[in-house]
Image: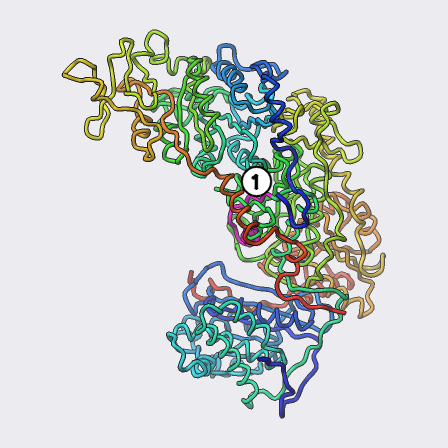
């Protein structure tokens, strides 16, 4: 972009052809994304796995390290940027999406990730996460959901189950929890997915798909806090039960799950139900087929409400739709204005309106 | 066609140095437009001008009610003036409510022009009048011109295809036309404006032109007026001028500053009175590459600005007191990560929601101290609407050079008030560019410039400089997270020293008048005009009184203490309860005297003059009696709204 005086204006480095060339010759590996900082989460924390999968996934995007930024809020998740050998900004509680929005406005070429938690994103930062999603800001939000406040040592969070006893709710919380994915869908995020900290391959695959999406990307990672909420997801994520209690979504495929691949989801009126293939004349053809690209959000919303034990817990991509991103629209309006009016001339601008001369 | 004024027949012409007119009417009567048209005309004619719009918070309060009264005061002069005038010479009152809320400020003998048609029983009742003041003799100390404006205007518009309501909406232009005649002004600028504005609606354009000309012709033909008044052009410094409000100058200043810095301007903002106009204006500058972002709240607005600065743009946000309070945590993040950031506070009457459309200077201490921890932030404060441009440039210079958030304190009076602006030659303004750091070999995130103590600006996208910053305390040089006690102490001192060091980089405090004497009046922000005028009068009377006006509130200019100590008394007038006074007393242990009021209105010249006179005669300033303000408050007048 040029400014009114014909000077190149800009904010410094953007993705240059030089950088692109480096990419072709430089094969990055996980190690390139490991910073020199000592990782400090509690031993056994699910965050280690999320960090590892994030570092492993980064080389796949073919984006030079200098063009990747991790922005975080406050909470245990907020430390992740320190451990990534990219640009990183550990901001303030709940506000990471606002910084990321401004950063993308300043330099749309950057790949911007937002690292947040259930308290950071859905409580103190609820307003910002909502609006970043409805604007389709091209940021990739990974929300670590451990259903507890960890860094402040164990208070109830917006995703803590009703009646949960915590330090702040000694006889049980009276606040109903919210489903993060339902919120993301209602707020019109253009990519909505879920994975699990310990399901490393699935998590890598989900992060990789998130990284390739352009627009508001929301990934909920079910994450275990072994200190303050140990085993929050144990009932359906453990190796021996997960096939029967979780539903791995695949685009264009029928919703089948179970160790024996014999269970599925069928629509009964407006409600989903679990059926067994081969029983009561149920065949694969009766099952719902996943369509992550559906323009209307009903199927995705229905999936976001399914939870163990009534249903298998869906993981994978619930929704992936394409629409112009916030930075594209902003830059588009600027380019339009320049096409229509010409690049602004400040000397003329300050003389606008009625002027008079004093000799 | 032209309407150049011809000498009026049988009418005496009187030369005046200065005239102050107040237009007052219902908020639906177009008083702001009337006032601003008169202002443009006077400005283009070459008078010095100063204006004070005074409008209600309600978008449309009940018609004819006291809370619905909207006013616009303009002072125009053949000499340099600094304020919109202490009191009007002429009051134009379009209805009884406008009369009731404004008459108290019209001095005896002042001219009162009223729309007699509006004094119906119903309107009188809404204004709380038991008897018609036009008939009960209560206005006999004024020079009253009762004109059936509505009737005359309706007659002038006969034959046009308009509803009676539409016709009524043009009566302000009748009043304007009459004022143009009375002050020998050309109708041309307004006729051109009507054509530009309503060109696509020929009937409306025609109606407004007819109303304007009818008002003018009425002045000429009626025998009501025996004198017209002439205010010659002022002898302003040579140059090209335009009329400008503070908010306009603020928006323009930051666009120019961003360009001088070679950075994109990214403006994150949430709508709030009286700062919203800055957003409105910047949103029209898309072809200048300005990126505006209407955020979901005040916090997101400043967050986006910090993110933009991190990305190498010039991040800026603006708000008023309640919004600035919400931004304080994020402002502290910018203090900690040491990124440039502009925070504009267009102050208004508080606390809480306060009086959104009324002016006040009550955020100085919030700007200084309203954040957790030791959090030094440079503060600049323009003194006049036109100066809002200069201090936008200055704020950007400091933010970039010192890698720091800068608070820019404007207020409602500056924001909406206007004055002639001598348009600068942009080529004469300095280059504000600072370079991004790009050298990997020398890069450490908190390795400071030895002169400015600024840290390097290492922008994402720069190869080899990948690093992490954040709100946790930083280790000196490396910027890694640190809980080391010595390091925290050192970093706290460094952040303070960086801001204190700016004192070496700003002009000394100038004194208007002798450098020593009996009384120094020290002000900041929009009190400038009233103080300067009062001091000029006192000096003309032979008193040893000087004026010093601060534009840099933090740090203060290095000679501030020395200037203050050169006078027997220091008087600090503020539209607050003594915030600068507190700072000066604390910093210098000088027993400054505060002059304080918070009425949502700027100072009158006389108020400051009387306070100085009290000091000169050894009386305490507290005992100064302000001229009684007879304006009935809207709530006292019936509690509408």
Q: Residue furthest bottom?
A: B10
**x and y percentages locating residue B544 in the rendered image:** 83, 63
Would you say A220 lies left or right of B236 here? left
| Residue B287 drawn above or below residue A206 | below
The chain letter for the residue carrying disc 1 is B
As rendered, which of A112 and A184 lies closer to the eye?
Answer: A112
Q: Residues within 10 Å of mark 1 (few under 14, many from 20)?
A: many
Element class at badge 1: helix
As rendered, which of B614 and A27 lies closer to the eye?
Answer: A27
Asked if residue B496 lies in the magenta stretch, the reply is no
Whether residue B366 is visible, yes or no, is: no
Would you say B54 lies left or right of B262 here? left
**x and y percentages locating residue A108 in the rendered image:** 55, 35
- The colour style of the image is rainbow
Q: How many marks?
A: 1
**x and y percentages locating residue A342 in the rendered image:** 59, 52
| Residue B538 drawn above or below residue A229 | below
As rendered, which of B388 and B571 lies closer to the eye?
Answer: B388
| Residue A265 drawn above or below residue A301 | above
Kindly identify which residue carries mark 1: B302
The quadrant the C terminus of chain B occupies is bottom left
**x and y percentages locating residue B406 in the rendered image:** 67, 42
Q: Say which quarter of the image contains residue B120.
A: bottom left
Whether residue B443 is visible, yes or no, is: yes
As rendered, which of B571 and B314 lies closer to the eye?
Answer: B314
The quadrant the N terminus of chain B occupies is bottom right
Q: Say which quarter of the image contains residue B244.
A: bottom right
| Residue B405 drawn above or below residue A210 | below
Residue span colored magenta: B266-283
Q: Residue furthest top?
A: A240
């Amino acid at each position: 972009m040029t400014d009114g005086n014909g000077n190149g204006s800009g904010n410094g480095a953007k993705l240059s052809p030089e950088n692109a060339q480096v990419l072709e010759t430089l094969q990055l590996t996980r190690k390139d994304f490991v910073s020199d900082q000592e990782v400090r989460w509690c031993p056994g924390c699910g965050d280690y796995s999320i960090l590892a999968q994030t570092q492993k996934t980064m080389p796949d995007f073919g984006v030079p390290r200098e063009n990747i930024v991790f922005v975080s809020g406050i909470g245990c998740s907020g430390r992740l940027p320190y451990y990534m050998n990219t640009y990183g900004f550990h901001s303030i509680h709940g506000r990471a999406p606002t910084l990321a929005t401004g950063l993308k406005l300043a330099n749309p070429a950057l790949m911007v990730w937002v690292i947040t938690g259930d308290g950071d994103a859905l409580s103190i930062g609820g307003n910002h996460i909502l609006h970043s999603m409805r604007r389709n800001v091209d940021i990739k939000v990974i929300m670590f959901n451990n259903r507890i406040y960890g860094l402040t040592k164990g208070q109830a969070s917006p995703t803590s189950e009703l009646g949960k006893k915590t330090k702040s709710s000694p006889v049980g919380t009276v606040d109903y929890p919210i489903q993060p994915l339902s919120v993301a869908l209602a707020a019109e995020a253009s990519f909505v997915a879920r994975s699990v900290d310990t399901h490393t391959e699935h998590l890598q695959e989900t992060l990789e798909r998130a990284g390739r999406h352009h627009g508001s990307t929301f990934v909920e990672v079910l994450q275990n806090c072994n200190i303050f909420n140990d085993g929050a997801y144990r009932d359906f994520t453990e190796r021996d039960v997960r096939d029967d209690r979780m539903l791995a979504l695949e685009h264009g495929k029928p919703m089948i799950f179970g160790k024996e691949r014999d269970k599925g989801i069928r629509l009964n009126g407006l409600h989903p139900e679990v059926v067994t293939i081969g029983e009561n004349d149920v065949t694969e053809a009766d099952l719902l087929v996943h369509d992550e690209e559906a323009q209307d959000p009903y199927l995705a919303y229905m999936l976001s409400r399914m939870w163990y034990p009534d249903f298998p817990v869906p993981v994978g991509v619930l929704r992936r739709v394409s629409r112009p991103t916030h930075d594209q629209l902003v830059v588009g309006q600027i380019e339009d204005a320049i096409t229509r009016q010409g690049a602004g001339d400040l000397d003329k601008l300050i003389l606008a309106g009625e002027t008079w001369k004093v000799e | 066609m032209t309407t150049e004024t011809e000498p009026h027949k049988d009418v005496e012409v009187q030369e005046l140095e200065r005239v102050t007119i107040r237009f007052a009417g219902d908020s639906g009567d177009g008083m702001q437009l009337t006032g601003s048209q008169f202002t443009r005309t006077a400005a283009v004619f070459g008078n010095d001008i100063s204006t004070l719009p005074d409008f209600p918070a309600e978008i449309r309060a009940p018609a004819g009610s006291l809370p619905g009264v909207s006013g616009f005061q303009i002072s125009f002069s053949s000499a340099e003036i600094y304020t919109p005038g202490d009191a009007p010479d002429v009051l134009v009152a379009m209805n009884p409510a406008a009369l009731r809320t404004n008459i108290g400020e019209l001095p005896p003998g002042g001219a009162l022009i009223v729309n007699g048609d509006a004094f119906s029983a119903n309107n009188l009742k809404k204004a709380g009048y038991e008897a018609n003041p036009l008939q009960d003799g209560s206005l006999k100390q004024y020079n009253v011109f009762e004109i059936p404006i509505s009737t005359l205007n309706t007659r002038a518009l006969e034959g046009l295809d308009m509803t009676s309501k539409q016709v009524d909406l043009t009566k302000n232009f009748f009043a304007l036309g009459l004022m143009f005649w009375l002050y020998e002004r050309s109708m041309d600028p307004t006729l051109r404006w009507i054509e530009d504005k309503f060109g696509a609606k020929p009937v409306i354009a025609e109606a407004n032109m007819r109303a304007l000309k009818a008002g003018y012709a009425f002045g000429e033909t009626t025998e009501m007026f025996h004198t017209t008044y002439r205010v010659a052009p002022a002898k302003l410094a040579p140059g090209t001028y335009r009329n400008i409000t503070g908010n306009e100058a603020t928006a323009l200043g930051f666009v120019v500053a961003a360009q001088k810095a070679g950075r994109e301007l990214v403006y994150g903002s949430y709508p709030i009175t009286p700062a919203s106009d800055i957003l409105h204006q910047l949103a029209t500058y898309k072809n200048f590459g300005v990126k505006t972002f209407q955020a979901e709240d005040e916090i997101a607005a400043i967050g986006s600005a910090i993110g933009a600065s991190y990305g190498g743009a010039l991040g800026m946000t603006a708000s008023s007191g309640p919004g600035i309070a919400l931004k304080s945590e994020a402002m502290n993040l910018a203090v900690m990560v040491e990124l440039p950031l502009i925070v504009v506070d267009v102050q208004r009457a508080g606390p809480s929601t306060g009086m959104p459309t009324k002016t006040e200077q009550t955020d100085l201490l919030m700007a200084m101290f309203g954040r957790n921890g030791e959090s030094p932030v440079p503060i600049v404060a323009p003194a006049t609407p036109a100066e809002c441009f200069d201090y936008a440039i200055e704020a950007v210079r400091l933010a970039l050079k010192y890698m720091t958030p800068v608070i820019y304190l404007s207020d409602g009076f500056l924001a909406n008030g206007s004055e002639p602006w001598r348009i600068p030659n942009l080529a004469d303004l300095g280059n504000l560019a600072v370079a991004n750091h790009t050298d990997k070999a020398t890069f450490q995130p908190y390795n400071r410039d030895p002169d400015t103590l600024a840290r390097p600006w290492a922008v994402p996208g720069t190869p080899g400089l990948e690093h992490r910053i954040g709100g946790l305390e930083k280790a000196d040089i490396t910027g890694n997270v640190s809980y080391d006690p010595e390091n925290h102490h050192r970093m706290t001192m460094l952040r303070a020293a960086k801001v204190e060091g700016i004192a070496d980089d700003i002009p000394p405090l100038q004194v208007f008048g002798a450098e020593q004497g009996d009384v120094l009046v020290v002000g900041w922000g929009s009190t400038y005009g009233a103080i300067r005028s009062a001091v000029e009068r006192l000096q003309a009377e032979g008193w040893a009184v000087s004026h010093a006006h601060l534009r840099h509130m933090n740090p203060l200019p290095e000679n501030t203490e020395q200037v203050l100590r050169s006078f027997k008394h220091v008087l600090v007038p503020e539209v607050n309860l003594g915030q600068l006074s507190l700072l000066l007393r604390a910093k210098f242990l000088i027993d400054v005297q505060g002059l304080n009021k918070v009425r949502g209105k700027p100072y009158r010249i006389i108020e400051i003059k009387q306070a100085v006179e009290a000091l000169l005669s050894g009386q305490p300033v507290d005992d100064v009696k302000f001229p009684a303000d007879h304006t009935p408050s809207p709530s006292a007048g019936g509690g509408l709204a």
